[in-house]
Amino acid sequence: MIIHLFGDLWGLDGVSISPSLRQAELSFFNLETPIINDYCMSQKNKCGVTLKTSFTSIQNIIQQFDGLVFLSLANNHIADYGEAGIKSTIEACERLNVCYYGVGYRNNMCPKIIKCQDNEIAVFVIAERQFGITSSNELGYSYYEESIFPQIIKAKNEGLFVIVSFHYGAEMSIWPSPDNQMLSRSFIDCGADVVYGHHSHVPKGFEKYHNGLIFYGLGNFTISKDYMSFGDNLDWSNMVELDISQNRIQNWEIIPIQMNQVNVQKISSDNKWQKYMHDACSPLNNELLLEGLWQSFVVKMYDNEYSYWFQTQGKHDYKLMYHLFNCSTHCSSVRTYFGLKSGNIKDVRDKKVNELSQKYFQLF
């Protein structure tokens, strides 16, 4: 059985998918935008950009795939149009006959079970806490909490193939934070076979850890032209091809793909791609280098964004502070910055760190 893992799916008109990308029994995406049919629907007053797409834009993409499509809905944009927008997205998923998961009225750490050929797959769909999380009285997305670990152990003990779909980490960075690396590895330690990360919008590194695979971020499968000019490496991504049988990985491959205008197709694994992926992956096996890159990233983030955000005043402050302190990646960034500045965290940035971070650092 062939499984394809793709990056962030933005609904665009007229997209054409190369046949070699469509031929899998099961294809995974993170649905980056809610599917809104009623364009009179009100967007929520939140920090950050508000995204949406139409049913026909998503339908044009989904119907090109041969097998079952799985949409992860747990992310920080799914509630951009409130509960009505989430319900509209659910209705669209039903009409499209896709498998979807990650939203509800209570935080759900139980997996979605998919049976296909001789495999039984448990899919956990979570995101970091940001805008749009679920509660007992509000429809929203499922967010990470530690109660997921016994559920992963249970699924593995039942012999299932376990995928953790996780919307997390720093945007526009090609490396995970040390905290997110440890968290991702802990999923594998509990029995997950694959950690399928998204949210970065640029391809992040990946690693084989013990008996599992961790993909920290695959990039954008499709992206609106309005955002493509915001930085480098936004118009290409990695596709993961997994060959599994009897709930075990038989083979796997990572393949670069690119959105050229509205055509999504494989691209060559040339020297440029190999160099990028080497730079993205090699720090994952070097604890000191990864810590230095994280320190460099948060210092630049603070100087370019956080310092401005902390100076704003007025009612918007409450939304902004909620946005920052509800999210563990933002909290870790600010904590690391003040730890460095106060001397409570040792500065491990060196020449190699500075060269790599200068080469790849960018902001939306």
Image (spheres, rainbow, N blue to C red):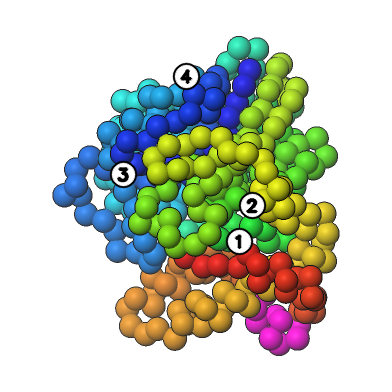
Q: CA distance from mark 3 to mark 4?
A: 22 Å
Q: Secondary structure at mark 3?
A: loop
Amino acid carrying mark 3 in the image: Thr
Q: Is residue 312 above or below residue 189?
A: below
Task: Indicate the position of residue 339 as horizontal and vertical percent values.
Answer: 70, 80
- The answer to whether marks 3 and 4 mark residues whose Cβ atoms lie closer than 8 Å is no
Left or right: where 288 falls relative to 140: right
Judged from the image, the secondary structure of the residue bearing numbered disc 1 is loop
> Whole-percent x and y of residue 338?
65, 82
Sequence order check, earlier mark of 3 and 4: 3
| 1 or 3: tag closer to the N-terminus | 3
Category of crowding for the residue at label 4, using alpha-carbon neighbours closer than 10 angstroms: few (below 14), some (14–19), many (at least 20): some
| Type of amino acid under label 2 | Lys
Q: Dot 3 corresponds to which residue?
A: 53
Q: Distance from label 1 to label 2 (Cα)?
A: 7 Å
Please report whichever mark, 2 or 3, sits nearer to the chain's N-terminal start: 3
Residue 70, visible in the rendered structure: yes
Label pair 4/2, CB-CB below 8 angstroms = no
Amino acid type of the residue tagged 1 in the rendering: Ser
Indicate which disc residue 204 carries: 2
- Quarter placement of the N terminus: top right
Q: Earlier in the sequence, mark 1 or mark 2?
A: 1
Q: Which mark is residue 95?
A: none
- At 52% from the left and 78% from the top, the residue drawn is 304
Q: Quote the CA–CA distance across marks 4 and 2.
A: 27 Å
Range shown magenta: 335-344
Say what amino acid the circle numbered 4 marks: Asp
Identify residue for label 1. Answer: 173
